[in-house]
């Protein structure tokens, strides 16, 4: 019963964060699902993989709500989305096979280290050279592949990589956030399919689930994240993003530290 209350609660929080920072919400959803799945007694070897698969499945719905809200404000560059999507699809789907072959402990540690990376990046607020621009077609496909692989390994919509990449190439912050929200959709679709395929024939998965995707968790998170993502997008166009990023960075550091502590002890 606790899980049925917490799924919608953290889904709503993930939706706000997805709209606000263009990160898909997976950064919040994955550690929460790890905690809740462990609390429910899921087999330890499946906890992290189901958290990653379920997170990506929920991002399919969150990203739609988020990028629609940003699109209405003219902040989605569809030419960028089109150029980067082929690499995204290949990298994300391929990455799910790598994730399925890795241990849950490794994936947890990898995710925690990734959170530290994102937090430091947010705190330092790197500034690009004014002359830097987006790469050509081959470069966009390559970057899409890289973002896709990492996203599948950590169960996110790619915003923690795509937003810094686009701002590094001098795309305005709010436009990078809006475009990242749209990029999150192909990441989520390819990742979800991959985690379903890789978990389809695995015995002993908690029911009800489809592959490595938990149906109750998906429903609880997706419905409420879709409702709150537009609110996050609205905030993104009104509030000072640098301050919000610093607050969020502190949250990421605390979350990563807790996960590393769990792996070590």
Image (spheres, helix red, strand yellow):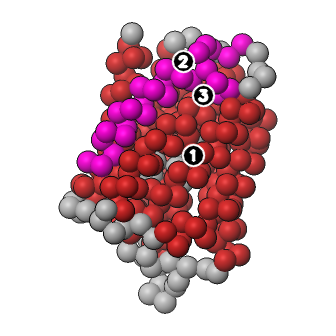
Query: In the image as oriented, which residue stretches furthest toward the bottom?
Result: 131
- Give the magenta-colored segment's residue range: 204-231
Foreground residue, 255 or 59? 59
CA–CA distance in space, label 1 to label 2:
24 Å
Tell me whether circle 1 and circle 2 mark residues in contact (CB < 8 Å). Answer: no
User: Considering the numbered disc 3 on the image, is that residue within a helix, a strand or a loop?
Assistant: strand
Q: Which residue is mark 2?
A: 38
Q: Is residue 169 left or right of residue 234?
A: right
- The quarter holding residue 173 reads bottom left
Q: Could you say where residue 27 lies in the image, as x and y percent from the top left?
A: 47, 43
Is residue 108 shown to the viewer in this render?
no
User: What secondary structure is the stretch in magenta mostly built from?
Assistant: helix
Point out which mark residue 213 bears: 3
CA–CA distance in space, label 3 to label 1:
12 Å
**Mark 1 or 2, which is nearer the eye?**
1
Please tell me which of labels 3 and 2 falls first in the chain: 2
């Amino acid at each position: 019963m606790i899980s049925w209350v917490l799924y919608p609660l953290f889904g709503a929080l993930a939706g706000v964060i997805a709209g606000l920072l263009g990160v898909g919400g997976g950064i919040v959803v994955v550690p929460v699902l790890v905690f809740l799945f462990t609390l429910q007694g899921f087999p330890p070897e499946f906890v992290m993989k189901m958290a990653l698969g379920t997170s990506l499945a929920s991002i399919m719905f969150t990203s739609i709500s988020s990028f629609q809200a940003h699109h209405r404000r003219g902040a989605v560059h569809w030419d960028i989305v089109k150029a980067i999507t082929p690499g995204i699809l290949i990298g994300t789907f391929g990455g799910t096979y790598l994730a399925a072959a890795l241990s849950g402990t490794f994936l947890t540690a990898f995710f925690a280290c990734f959170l530290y990376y994102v937090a430091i990046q947010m705190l330092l607020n790197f500034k690009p050279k004014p002359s830097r621009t987006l790469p050509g077609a081959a470069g966009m496909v390559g970057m899409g592949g890289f973002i896709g692989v990492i996203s599948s390994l950590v169960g996110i919509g790619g915003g923690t990589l795509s937003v810094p990449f686009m701002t590094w190439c001098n795309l305005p912050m709010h436009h990078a956030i809006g475009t990242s929200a749209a990029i999150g959709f192909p990441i989520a679709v390819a990742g979800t399919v991959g985690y379903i395929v890789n978990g389809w024939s695995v015995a002993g998965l908690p029911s009800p689930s489809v592959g490595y995707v938990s149906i109750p968790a998906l429903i609880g998170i997706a419905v409420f994240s879709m409702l709150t993502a537009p609110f996050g997008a609205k905030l993104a166009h009104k509030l000072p993003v640098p301050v919000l990023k610093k607050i969020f960075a502190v949250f990421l550091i605390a979350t990563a530290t807790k996960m590393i502590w769990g792996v070590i002890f």
